[in-house]
Image: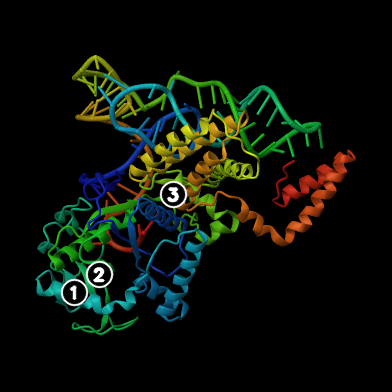
RNA sequence: GCCAAGGUAGCUUAGCGGCGAAGCGGUGGACUGCAGAUCCAUUACACGUGAGUUCAAAUCUCACCCUUGGCUCCA
């Protein structure tokens, strides 16, 4: 039985799909006006693994992620650069997809863009006005939070508290907490609407899109912790008011923040790291493993030291897996004493047990480490029979699928290609030198190779 | 002020009523010409403070101290 922590109820709940074995998953996508950072990466890797695991559990998952391509930040930046806002958005959308590809985040089925769903957005706003939940003003259409008694249920906020706004007060708003559904504007990308030309507010694109593709009620809505208020709160207000159906989503899932060396990542602090920056010097697989080392809802503290630690831990598992693949070529005898199968059973069960507890990857990985140690120990004495070896490898293969990690080394070997031959030659020469006991020169070569980023195993 | 998360071995993280935990690090060993990598073993009074509930608490209750984040830019 899978349990999922629901932000709405603040507890773990047994997971049950709304309809049969189909899970509809929506995760708030990026606003494409600059390169995505490693905080985005944390969130999207988490949901990538969540989807993979649900699929492993036998669900058919439809995963939707919107692209916010209409937004004040995009407009601001495009004005600065003298570019068309939508062109700018397309550029960063493309770069976003490239980044995700490199991170192995590839589970999203469809990326609807806000700009391509204006009709649905207008339709939903009209419904809200008709039902008395929204009202037009000279500056735009607003949602009237006083008409929705549940407003604040996700973020646990009282409407009274929301009347104190840090922003300039808007004389047309009925309540200071009311949020824009449609903004009447004269410049920037504009669309016609019954209320005049302008553009949609931030929150409405998600509910218009999800209603279109997932219906007014669906299984899981995810995003970063920072989206709970006001974004997700507003979505609930819009959708549940428009459809009259409660709840809009069965499970609200939120990922914790990624901090950098204990501090919030921000441009003013100068510790802002984009995915591109990261991947220049570090392997995407290692970052994925690093993300797994903390539960998805907990804050995770990024540092080079922590990343290096993850690299070492990850290597430990990979080494074993490759050792096991090598065994396939050996002559394996049937033996009566077979400790491997029992361990596999035990730790495999542990792994899935913890994954079932709200995708608790740290103890799930701990079980894998325990299995690794056990196998390493036993391998000094005996070897598994072929069928058992295949069972073990099959488990590691499942791990690769679920976690989106590559445990077999073949990948890296292919990557080297050209320089490989050259390297081969150098190593061969060094080997000769060692035979001749020319240590000094051999060590010099080794030192230089290490400087260049190569490791020597002999 | 309100809301939320958290304070667990040197470090990073799990556990959340009863077998003292995973990785990294440290130490010892195997391997090696040496070093590294790898493998094995081992190490560590572990649970912010004070009180309470309980046969039993890191785990529940209360109080307090400290940290971080959110409060309409934000994954």
Considering the image in quadrants, where does the N terminus of chain A appear?
Answer: top left
Residue A55: give x, y in percent of width and height.
37, 55
Q: Quadrant of residue B62?
A: top left
Counting from the top left corner in percent of width and height, residue A180 is at 22, 70
Residue under label 2, please give it: A204
Do the residues at discs 1 and 2 belong to one chain? yes
Mark 2–mark 3 Cα distance, whole angstroms, equals: 29 Å
Say which element carries label 3: strand
Q: State the residue position of label 1.
A: A125
* Mark 1 or 2, nearer chain start: 1
> Could you say which is closer to the camera, residue B59 or residue A342?
A342
Q: Quadrant of residue A219?
A: bottom left
Q: Quadrant of the C terminus of chain A?
A: top right
Q: Nearer the viewer, residue A254 or A164?
A: A254
Report the number of numbered marks: 3
Query: Closer to the observer: label 2 or label 3?
Result: 2
Q: Which residue is mark 3?
A: A259
Q: Is residue A144 visible?
A: no
């Amino acid at each position: 039985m899978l349990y999922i922590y629901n932000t709405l109820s603040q507890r773990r709940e047994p997971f049950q799909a709304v309809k049969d074995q189909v899970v509809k998953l929506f995760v708030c996508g990026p606003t494409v006006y600059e390169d995505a950072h490693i905080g985005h990466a944390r969130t999207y890797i988490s949901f990538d693994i969540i989807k993979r695991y649900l699929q492993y559990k036998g669900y058919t998952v439809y995963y939707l992620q919107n692209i916010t391509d209409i937004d004040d930040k995009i407009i601001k930046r495009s004005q600065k650069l003298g570019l068309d806002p939508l062109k700018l958005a397309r550029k960063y959308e493309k770069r976003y997809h490239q980044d995700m590809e490199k991170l192995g985040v590839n589970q999203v089925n469809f990326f609807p863009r806000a700009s391509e769903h204006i009709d649905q957005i207008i339709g939903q706003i009209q419904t809200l006005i008709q039902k008395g939940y929204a009202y037009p003003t000279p500056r735009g259409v607003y949602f009237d939070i006083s008409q929705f008694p549940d407003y604040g249920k996700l973020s646990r906020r009282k409407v009274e508290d929301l009347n104190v706004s840090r922003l300039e007060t808007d004389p047309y708003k009925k309540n200071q907490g009311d949020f824009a559904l449609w903004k009447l504007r004269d410049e920037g990308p504009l669309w016609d609407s019954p209320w005049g030309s302008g553009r949609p507010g931030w929150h409405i694109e998600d509910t218009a899109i999800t209603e279109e593709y997932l219906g007014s009620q669906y299984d899981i809505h995810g995003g970063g912790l920072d989206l709970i208020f006001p974004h997700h709160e507003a979505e609930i207000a819009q959708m549940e008011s428009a459809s009259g159906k409660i709840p809009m989503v069965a499970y609200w899932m939120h990922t914790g923040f990624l901090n950098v060396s204990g501090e919030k990542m921000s441009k003013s602090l100068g510790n802002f790291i984009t995915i591109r920056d990261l991947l220049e010097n570090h392997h995407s697989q290692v970052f994925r493993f690093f993300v797994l080392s903390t539960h998805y809802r907990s804050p995770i503290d990024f540092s080079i030291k922590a990343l290096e630690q993850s690299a070492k831990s990850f290597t430990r598992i990979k080494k074993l897996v490759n050792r096991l693949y090598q065994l396939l070529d050996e002559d394996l005898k049937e033996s009566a004493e077979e400790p491997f199968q029992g361990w596999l059973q035990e730790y495999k069960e542990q792994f899935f047990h913890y994954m079932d507890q709200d995708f608790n990857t740290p103890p799930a990985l701990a079980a894998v480490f325990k299995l690794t140690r056990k196998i390493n120990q036993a391998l000094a004495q005996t070897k598994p029979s072929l069928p058992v070896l295949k069972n073990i490898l099959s488990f590691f293969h499942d791990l690769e699928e679920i976690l989106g990690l590559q445990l077999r080394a073949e990948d890296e070997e292919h990557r080297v290609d050209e320089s490989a031959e050259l390297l081969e030659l150098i190593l061969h020469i060094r080997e000769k030198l060692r035979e001749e006991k020319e240590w000094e020169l051999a060590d010099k070569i080794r030192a230089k190779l290490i400087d260049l980023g190569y490791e020597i195993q002999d």
